[in-house]
Image: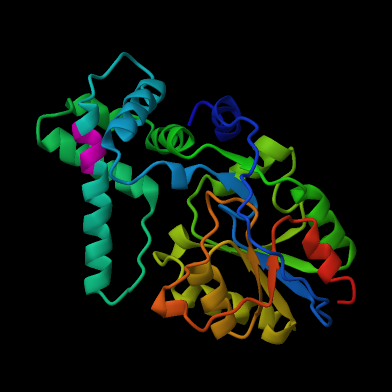
Amino acid sequence: MTVSPRDIIQAHCRPRDPLPSGATPVLRPLAGLRAVLFDVYGTLLISASGELKRTDLVARAEAVRAAFAAATIAGNIPVPATAAAAALVQTIQEIHERARVAGITYPEVEIVDVWKHTIARLIASGLLPPAAERIDVCRLALEYEVRVNPVWPMPGLVDCLDQLRDRSMQLGLVTNAQFFTPEIFPALLGRTLEELGFHAGLQWYSYRYGRAKPDLWLFEQARAGLSRSGVAASEVLFVGNDVLNDVCPARRVGFWTALFAGDTRSFRPRLGDPRVAHVVPDLVITDLSMLPRCLKGA
């Protein structure tokens, strides 16, 4: 990738405000905590992913066209954008299906691999020239992502993390994400995840394991990793914006839970969903500034 990921992210991600969800905060002091784990998209980052429907091939096709133009170094490659967008979706669906047949209920893709397969499929179909094999696929994947899902840090994020770190909290991530996710933080905040307080050994990204939340597996890995550091599940709080993907599996492994309801675009209370009918988070926060206040006695 000749252009840095940070440059690409900065070029396409602009300040945006969260939209109030109307949820009522549920706050109470939690004592005895030693670690806080977070989801990323929709919790630490304002995410536009909920605004673009998976079936919106027109918008996706335009993003494909622009991504190919940006990632093609030597000369323009004619791109059948609509066909390419459809092929991308089809490739993801096929990878998911193979994983489900292999016994993975909630599979995750590795997006660079997806783009490689998609380009190969388009070349084999005669829709792309063989020269497309020389495209910088990592850049292509990121150029597409910043167009379909531009992000921005949630208000109060840095202050929240600084306060938690000042209280000697171990900070970590359990998140559905791709290779470029860690690059977002230094690009938009000027600090790496480690500089923000996230321990390198406490970061679990779905793409690395081929499993996505709400798969319990990721949370089990987090519980085991913290246990090796001497932190029990009952000393961990997990913060996420989705009752199904975040609160439910976190509770099942014994973590305390906080439902983040700070942006209606990403807030997923899953009301009426029988899979989480009896799942109640320990906290409901509508602003990240509320979190340290609940952990004052921890």
Task: Based on the picture, tell me whether residue 188 belongs to the magenta stretch.
Answer: no
Q: Quadrant of residue 166?
A: bottom right
Residue 202 visible in the current orientation: no
Q: Main secondary structure of the magenta part?
A: helix
Provide residue 198's location: percent of width, then percent of height.
72, 59
**Residue visible at 54% across and 84% down in the picture:** 252
Q: Is residue 209 above or below residue 8?
A: below
Return the residue nearer the eye: 138 or 80.
80
Return the residue nearer the eye: 13 or 30.
30
User: Relative to residue 127, is residue 269 drawn left or right?
Assistant: right
User: Relative to residue 193, is residue 222 drawn left or right?
Assistant: left
Provide residue 278's location: percent of width, then percent of height.
51, 84
**Residue visible at 74% across and 56% down in the picture:** 288
Provide residue 75's location: percent of width, then percent of height.
31, 13
Quadrant in which the C terminus is drawn: bottom right
Residue 47 visible in the current orientation: yes
**Residue visible at 71% across and 77% down in the picture:** 236
Highlighted magenta segment, given as a residue range:
83-87
